[in-house]
Amino acid sequence: MATRREVLVAGASLVAVQACPPVTNTPDAGPRTLDPQPFDHAMRVMAPASTLSEASFPQTVSAGAMAKDAALLWTRVEGLTKVKLRVWRDVGSETEVALVSETTADVPDHGNVKLRATGLAPATWYSYAFFSEDLSKRSQIGRVRTAFPDDWKEPLTVGATSCASYKYRPFKPLETLAKQPIDLWLHLGDVSYNDGATDLATYRVKWREQLMDPGYRALMPSAGAYFTWDDHEFANNIDVEREGLGSGLVVGAMTSFKETLPVEAGDVWRSYRWGLTAEFFVLDLRTERKGSTRTTPQEQFVSPAQLAWLEAGLEKSPCHFKVVLTSVPIANFPEASWPSRNDRWQGWQLQREQLLSFIDTKGIDNVWYLSGDIHVGTIHRVEAMGARRKFFEVCVGPAGNVNPITIVLEPGNEANRGDFFPAAQFLYASGAFQATTLTFDPNANTVRVVFLDPKQGDAKTCDQTLTFGQGA
């Protein structure tokens, strides 16, 4: 991070931000606000007279791993050896901003630059961009909100998406999601369909092509995100155990994912807390499963370490909502009709039962599941009958892929609909490409789920407010 003297040398005139108009967060960010100045010690500077350069910054920017005082920020660079990252708050001026930090970094050979911005204020919207060293060229401008303070219990609205196959570009649901008043967004896997790539070089090419899509270019800079992976970041229905963790394909897929997205190094599975409102548990359901153990007493869908971490995290979380990001559904779907059960929790009943029994035994309420993979937008119960009807899972609308079984949802096919989407379990189902938003309101103890269809002018095709355990 540059010192204040280094910023002055760069030609910016600084004054204390306390004299500026109060910072205003985005609409619908919630009624509660705080003064960020005691946290980030921003200084008022002249905004650089820079020009957006698609040549130097050919893709978008993105933020992730948001905490109450930090976030990871990413872009891809061409033709520059060094860049500067600036993070600031708006102060209601066209010529000045409240500069929080300026960091200079080398550009690696692959061009992906990822830097952590620290010393931020909680519950605050920040702007950021990457610049050339002389500040004459810049990337797109991104925005990110930091997580709530530990003691906040405020409503939180998130966007969510999954399954973006290159066959269905442009991804209109992502453009729709970018227009919504969300605090953050979630990607439940299949961020990029990289099928056919076999080494790091070809994976990098696939990622570059994918993130040129207008939907990603709109959504990624609009708010921060948490990401997980599924199979298509590697290859369709990949068996990592058979392929080998050290193979060129798997190493290339994992390396390119972590280069290209604002995700932390190390294990994909980790959690992020937003005050007392919600804790998001991001799972890795691909690289730890061992197909050779399925149906044996040593069954491993996830590693024992990941499962123990999840159980401990759910039990000790002080948050009202515990939100589990599972790339594949945890619900038991009708056995006779739904295909590919072995690719979901349903095909790994020992570990599934261990997790759900733990939650039952400990009496952990308000555990909600968000999933992707099946190319259907749904609201459904984890089990159609019994005590676990109280748990809801939302399979977020696909950005771009289809599921043939959704033909039963079309008019005239009502007679077969119950075989796949029984009313006792499914509150909503649609095969349309849709954007999904969820509002977690701890004070009302509700979760509002909205599906939006770009083909219908972003109309709401579903707007349901749920309470944990309702109808169970």
Image (spheres, helix red, strand yellow):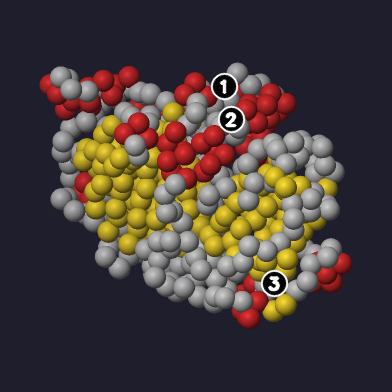
Q: Which mark is residue 210?
A: 2
Q: Residue at x 79, y 53 (%)?
A: 135
Q: Which quadrant holds residue 192?
A: top right
Image coords of residue 121 (percent x, y): 58, 70
When the figure is inspected, residue 99 is found, relative to residue 171, above or below; the finding is: below
- Type of amino acid under label 3: Arg
Q: Residue at x 40, y 33 (%)?
A: 398
Along the polypeptide, which appears first: circle 3 or circle 2? 3
How many residues crowd around disc 2 within 10 Å: few (fewer than 14), some, or many (20 or more)?
many
Q: Which residue is mark 3?
A: 44
Q: Are marks 3 and 1 in contact (CB under 8 Å)?
A: no
Dot 1: what SS?
loop
- Type of amino acid under label 1: Asp
Q: Which residue is mark 1?
A: 195
Using the numbered discs, state the Cα–Cα distance from disc 3 to disc 2 in whole angstroms: 37 Å
How many residues crowd around disc 1 within 10 Å: few (fewer than 14), some, or many (20 or more)?
some
Q: Nearer the viewer, residue 29 or 325?
A: 29
Q: Residue at x 63, y 62 (%)?
A: 94
Q: Nearer the viewer, residue 154 or 97?
A: 97
